[in-house]
Amino acid sequence: MNTIQEIREIKNTAILLIHCPDRQGILATVTEFLNKNQGNIIYLDQHVDREEGLFYMRVEWELTDFLIPRDKIADYFETLIAQKFGMTFWLHFTEERPRMALFVSKMSHCLFDILARYTAGEWDVEIPLIISNHEKLKPVADRFGIPFCLSEKNGQNKSDAEAEELKRLKSHNIDFIVLARYMQVLSDDFVTHFPNRIINIHHSFLPAFAGAKPYHAAHQRGVKIIGATSHYVTADLDAGPIIAQDVVRISHIDTVDSLVRKGRDLEKIVLSEAVYKHLQHKILVYNNRTVIFN
């Protein structure tokens, strides 16, 4: 299936994500650096965590007339500004289209939502492959013209299977992974290859009801809301930095099946919101928490 990705408007901009100890003059120094080098700022957002004394910032500017060559921007910024303020920073270029791999199991609702947005051209991303531990969703991948890789796992072959998956991801130059209701726990070793670059959707309002069967647990507990949480994957199960969350009200008349039905709508919306924020480079992770820029 063809997408309309090819007709997207390509922005020739750069994005800086910054965090450092808060002090006077950071914002003025960064913007002066960009202005002096003829960088036209088109987006700027910043946040100060006064309890921790930390400064966070996202700034995007046009590169058309920028005086510093692209391959020298990071070096210039590190030498002239970052070292002075003790900054940690990330530099991204919007001309570079990220490459996303999808991991799925048997449930299709999140996969269909992602592929619909991709096909409609909502996201500036490439999807070179879909990896699954079941064959059930191969027809979906075929329908959208995306290569499908079956990677069956059990207690005996998990290490070998993940090693093969990592080879495939490397050969396809994958930048980040989305677990679209992938019902396998990734090993710590696998996760270390993609720090803050594996996005998961969990079907509860974390930290409540982490782990398996959260809808069953919510029904048994008699809660009045259920939720969905998208987060970066870490070594701790369902405990990574949270990117997006949402909830829906329920009542005593709801069954487990009705919770699952209502929850699936939340899951796909929350996961897609997290993927969009990641693609826009609007997430800063610090101490297992996130700053999500507008």
Image (cartoon, rainbow, N blue to C red):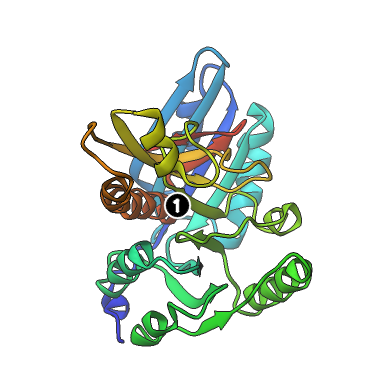
Q: Which residue is more in the foreground, 51 or 239? A: 239
The quadrant of the image that shows the C terminus is top left
Question: Residue at the location (51% across, 42% down)?
Answer: 17
Q: Amino acid at mark 1?
A: His
Left or right: 100 in relation to 125: right
Name the image quarter holding residue 19. Answer: top right
Left or right: 259 in relation to 215: left
Expressed as whole percent of the image width and height from the top left, the position of residue 259 reads 30, 45
Residue 281, placed above or below residue 18: below
Which residue, as the protein is rendered here, is positioned at the far top? 51
Left or right: 212 in relation to 276: right
Question: Residue at the location (39% across, 37% down)?
Answer: 293
Expressed as whole percent of the image width and height from the top left, the position of residue 36 reads 45, 42
Expressed as whole percent of the image width and height from the top left, the position of residue 138 reads 44, 82
- Density class for disc 1 (Cα within 10 Å; few <14, some 14-19, many ≥20) is some
Q: Is residue 25 visible?
A: yes
Q: Which residue is more in the foreground, 117 or 80? A: 117
Q: Is residue 294 visible?
A: no
Residue 18, placed above or below residue 180: above
Q: Which residue is mark 1?
A: 278
Name the image quarter holding residue 247. Answer: top left
Question: Residue at the location (24% across, 31% down)?
Answer: 252
The quadrant of the image that shows the N terminus is bottom left
Residue 203, placed above or below residue 12: above
Name the image quarter holding residue 140. Answer: bottom left
Expressed as whole percent of the image width and height from the top left, the position of residue 71 reads 60, 61
Question: Residue at the location (42% across, 46% down)?
Answer: 203
Left or right: 215 in relation to 178: left
Q: Which residue is more in the foreground, 61 or 104? A: 104
Q: Which residue is more in the foreground, 121 or 213? A: 213
